[in-house]
Image (cartoon, rainbow, N blue to C red):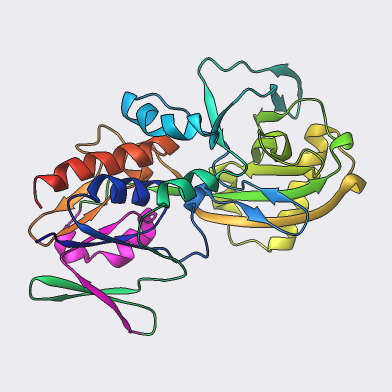
Amino acid sequence: MKPNIAIIGAGLAGLTLARELAEHAHITLFEKARGLGGRMSTRRNDSHQWDHGAQFFTARTPAFQAMLAPFIDNGTVVEWQPNITTLSPDKAPFKRPWFEPHYVASPAMNRLLKGMAEGLDVRLQTRVAALVQQQEQWQLLDENEQLLGEYDWVISSAPLPQTRELLPAELLGNCLDAYRMLPCYALLLAVDDAALPVWDAASVNDSPVRWIAFNHRLPGRNRQAGAVVVHTTPEWSTTHLEDDQEQVTQRLIDTFCTLTGVSADAITQAQLHRWRYALSAEVEAPEAGFVLNPHHRLAACGDWCLGGRVEAAFTSARQLADALQRQL
């Protein structure tokens, strides 16, 4: 009989794990958000959309390239060839070349996740608040202590802090101590495209801002609806994480305008998203790309296990799937 496995989180890691294990187990994914994506999610309103998390991804391993191949063939994943510049407050901008293919999903970053989720049992807007061990199974409870189901295995693909909260520390020991996640702000602006510089994205030095992208110029987007994404450095974000959010918004608008030369009058909308767990710190010599306790049938995976790139989420999940297939 196939085991029942609960996967908490339906981002790239959770969906990869579910696809890899689908032939070996009955899989249910629980996602607290309204839609798929995690840090590959997309925010929309009536006129604009912003990929406010991951802006692009690379594919350096044959396994990830093979997974992406059908999505490239059907147009869901497209190579992005932008005009990239480097900005700093006190130096002239200069062109920044890329030496490997960079990809985006079209018409939004979460479209790749939607494609990966086809045929899977995904429970959206369902928050797993607690685990209770009952003999050989785990009971999953929501925030109202209502039973979500009983499972043989529970696997968290959620960000590290949520994984720490959910998986019993007494059963995992210090397995999670080697990992760390850092915050980031995403400032989302609506700006008429004619008011923007000719470049498409910028890496920024010596500033609270580390990245600026004119999101509407990515493949498959509405180029008439100027949508700008501004990301801050993790250091600045950590220092100002609990500051008044209106003040943070204004500080970042001022910084954006100074860096780009765009007039504040050209900005017609502005909203701030606080990613408390945005970036994964580099992991020094990880023993494995996942966490596994086969005795208690608990596990965890995610980009935080391998240092934070989008591809790291896929690799972590695939390595865990290989290990679990020997346990099931």
Residue 75 point in image, percent of width and height? 55, 33
- Single out the residue that lies furthest toward the right: 265
Q: Is residue 130 left or right of residue 151?
A: right
Residue 282 point in image, percent of width and height? 38, 36
Quarter of the image where one finds residue 81: top right
The quadrant the N terminus occupies is bottom left
Residue at the spot 75% in from the left edge and 42% down from the top edge: 222
| Rendered view: 284 above or below 161 | above
Any part of residue 132 in sight: yes
Residue at the spot 15% in from the left edge and 43% down from the top edge: 323
Q: Is residue 313 left or right of residue 188?
A: left
How many numbered discs, if any? 0
Q: Nearer the viewer, residue 87 or 222?
A: 222
Residue 74 point in image, percent of width and height? 51, 34
Quarter of the image where one finds residue 78: top right
What is the span of residues highlighted in magenta in the rendered image?
Answer: 145-174
Any part of residue 309 in sight: no
Residue at the spot 74% in from the left edge and 62% down from the top edge: 246
